[in-house]
Amino acid sequence: MVKTVNVSRKILPVLCLVAIFLFVSPVVLAQGIGDSTTYTMQEEYRIEINDVGDGKITDTITYDEAWFEEYGSLFEENPNLLSRRYREDSDVGEVENFEADIDRGDGTITITFDTPGLAYNMGDNWSVYGYGNYEVADESDDEVVLEAAWEGVNNEFTLFENMNLEEQVIIDLPDGSTNASFDTSTGAIEYELAYVAKEGSGGVLADNKTLFTIIFALVIILSLILLLYVFTRETEAPAAVAAVTTAMPAPAAPQAPPEAAGAAQATAGDATAEAAPRFCKKCGHPKGKPDERFCRNCGATHE
Amino acid sequence: MSKNMKAVLSIVAIVLLLGSVAGLILTLTAAGAASAEPKLEVQLLPREEILTAAYKVYGDDQQNQWAAKTLIKNVGDVPVESFTISYKIEGYCDWTSTENYPTILPGETVRDYCWPNLDDAQMKEITTKTPVELTVRYQYDGLSQPVEDTDKIYLLGRNDFVFTSLADEDVLTFTDQFDNYPMVAAFVTPNEETVKSVANALAGGLETGMNDQDVGTAFLRVFDGLRQLGVKYIQEPSSYWSDRAAQYVQYPAETLSRTTGTCLDLAICYAALMEAVGIKSYVALIPGHAIPVIELPNSGEWYAIESTFIDKDYALSHFPGETSPEVTAAECVDMAAAELDQAMQEGSFIMIDIEQAWKNGVMPIW
């Protein structure tokens, strides 16, 4: 005898309802079970990739307005619903700066987060994996658009109710990328991006370290050689002065007036003995007396 | 050389010397701002624990069950060339195949995953939670020798099952409490010799692959056969080894040899015996209970049975009046159908598709 459970596999997903409603609100549970409408939600999953393969995700889910009006508050009351899958072990290090924004007016939830290393650098090209069940809708050098439709989606984002999902994935590729394509066999978006080394951040000296090291070292050596040269050369000044001194006539003695020559010669012996000059320093007129105080010629005072 | 000339030349030479020394110092100290040396930050992130019973899934790179992950970031100013990385779990997995990353640009992050092919014989011997050492080894151009880093990773006992990996605050629904439910399929071992022998003996002479009637007959024969073996229902032992909701789960051969089992043990044993003769099986989880379910090959309908009532004494003592004194298999089918219907109406049930889980890489240990 065979006895079957009175539920077919086809209707099972419909019955597999919204256990969260038990947790959240018995009233809502009753409404959920009684609601046989299959709603459709639209999702735009935009990925902006930078030049080192990091992804910035903006995931906008648009719900049926009536459904969201009735149940959207549950997302606000249970914020873990939107974030818990992004906090799993498998997302450690892959989800940063997670934020969720619920817009009751538009019936949308917008989730944003960053994923470092979303694209893999394969040397010749970059690859973004994970889109095996999608079809390409548009393809250009700076953007690839993929689309997919799903039935019976049942998870946190549907509050565990079965919904249809129309999904569009927009991949904004980095500036300068070329040859973007979608590989249906691997489900990967591939593109090429030439690597441009960034300008050095250490200034002219750091960016040209080797050159400047050589230049400065050479200048140091040259200046040391110059210093050595200068200090090992004798100063020419003393020898030259001596030579000039010997070549020049002896300083001329004050010329005595002709009429005083005899007296000068006559008093020469005395001149060496006596410091006082015998002539007026001003006009050269011979003193009348050794102790004469004023010049008799010009009137100047004798010292 | 005149005194003046000497003085001028001396001043010029000293100025040049001081200037060039200062320039050289500036040049050398400015070198740190734009180092030409590759520089990486490497962070090893092991999974908190490995469910040993389902160890094969961690080696399947098509699943999301990596054993460890490494985040590699180039924090230098020049590209890192020819980066290679490999992993080892001492005593349980030799070095994994090397992953190559031709170039890691400045500012680029690479996420690399460890998918270890864990040693069959070793894994089957792990009876309690065991810490092991995970080593990552990497190399790139410019390094004189590979760099190694290690961390601890825990292998659960082969019978240990953790129902969910979600944090307590994230467990919101019935399904959340059993978030690891596909891993139950790892305990269903239809190819184990004892299981095959018992299944063949009980289902011998039946067309279990294509005939609904024969499949139903086999389903009931297993119930009666296990009762004849003297199988008794027991409460699950303490799961002291985990802070989370967890259970010591028996493999079908252990249930058959010990002739005792929890509701989950009995449902798993039932599923293994059914799969051993080609009958598609499920394990249904409902609040506080597990029920074996099969799918009829022609109609596609489900067929469930209250397997704990194999233990007639338990059924009569704990559920007096709910069945006849014989506690027949047919009565237990009715009881299971009622239990499932109620759980479905409440939305509190999980139907574990054993074959689908196997296809998804959760292969049995035996």
Image (cartoon, coloured by chain):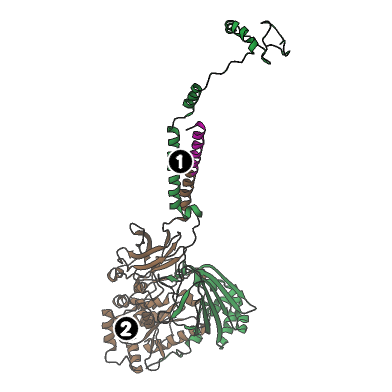
| Residue B150, horizontal then vertical, whole percent | 37, 60
Query: Residue at the spot x=50%, y=74% of the render?
Result: A173
- Quick one: label 1, few (<14), some, or many (20+) residues within 10 Å? many
Q: Note whether B314 is above or below A52 in the view shown.
A: below
Q: Identify the chain of the residue marked 1, using the numbered disc in the image.
A: A
Q: Which chain is green?
A: A
Q: Note whether A131 is above or below B71 in the view shown.
A: below
Residue type (three-letter) at the residue carrying disc 2: Leu
Which of the two residues, A185 or A83, is positioned nearer the viewer here?
A185
Residue B273 is labelled as 2
- Judge whether residue B17 is colored magenta: yes
Colour in which chain B is shown? brown
- Quick one: label 2, few (<14), some, or many (20+) residues within 10 Å? many
Disc 1: which residue = A223
Q: Note whether A112 is above or below A298 in the view shown.
A: below
| Residue A131, horizontal then vertical, whole percent | 45, 79
Query: Residue at the spot x=69%, y=11% of the render?
Result: A302
Residues in magenta? B1-19
In the rendered image, the residue lying farthest to the front is A258
Residue A193 visible in the shown view = yes
Of tags 2 and 1, the one toward the viewer is 1
Which of the two residues, B84 or A196, is positioned nearer the viewer here?
A196
Q: Identify the chain of the residue marked 2, using the numbered disc in the image.
A: B
- Judge whether residue B261 is colored magenta: no
Q: Main secondary structure of the magenta part?
A: helix
Which of the two residues, B129 or A113, is positioned nearer the viewer here?
A113
Q: In screen coordinates, is A228 left or right of B258?
A: right
| Residue B296, horizontal then vertical, whole percent | 38, 91
Q: Are marks 2 and 1 on the same chain?
A: no
Alpha carbons under labels 2 and 1: distance apart: 95 Å
